[in-house]
Amino acid sequence: MLTPEICSAMYQCYTSMLAAAQNNDLEALSAHEHTLAQLRMRAVEQHTPIELSRESIETMQAQIARMLEIDAQILEYVGPLLEETRKLLSGSVKDRAVRNAYRSAEF
């Protein structure tokens, strides 16, 4: 269950991830992503129902909406890097496949 405390911590993590993405600090981005995964697991493992005030619900809704916006912004910064990495990895896989094919061919 997502609590106001976990939601707030996740929101802070997302804002830190955006700053890291803007500064091209991939190590910090990765560390924040790991922290975010831990927070998600805490929310999943939280089974005790809690009463939330209307104000808490509205705050959490606003934070979640902003996290989705921040996630899209992070992808704007990191997306080109991810695409370049995919191309490099794809090229490496193709090169390896060609080498293996010629190595196993008997002439």
Image (tube, grey):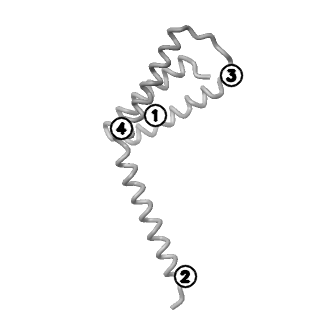
Name the residue rendered at 60%, 26% in the picture.
43
Q: Tell me the residue that label 2 is attached to.
A: 104
Q: Give me the C-alpha separation between circle 2 and circle 1.
A: 45 Å
Q: Measure the C-alpha gap from mark 4 to mark 2.
A: 44 Å
Check disc 1 and give the amino acid type. Answer: His
Residue 61 x, y percent position in the rendering: 49, 19
Where does the N terminus fall, quadrant-wise? top right
The answer to whether residue 94 is above or below residue 71 is below
Q: Is residue 52 left or right of residue 23?
A: right
CA–CA distance in space, label 4 to label 3: 33 Å
Residue flagged by tag 4: what amino acid is it?
Ala
Q: Earlier in the sequence, mark 4 or mark 1?
A: 4
Q: Amino acid at mark 3?
A: His
Where is residue 30 shown, x and y percent of the image?
45, 40
Residue matched to label 3:
47
Q: Quadrant of residue 23?
A: top left
Label 1 sits on a secondary structure element that is: helix
Left or right of 11 on screen, residue 104? right
Q: Which residue is mark 4?
A: 21
Whichever of labels 4 and 3 marks the residue nearer the N terminus, that label is 4
Q: CA distance from mark 3 to mark 1?
A: 25 Å
| Residue at the disc numbered 1 | 32
Kindly identify the residue that appears in the image at 45 percent across and 24 percent down: 65
As measured in the structure, the alpha-carbon distance from the residue carrying label 2 to the one carrying label 3 is: 56 Å
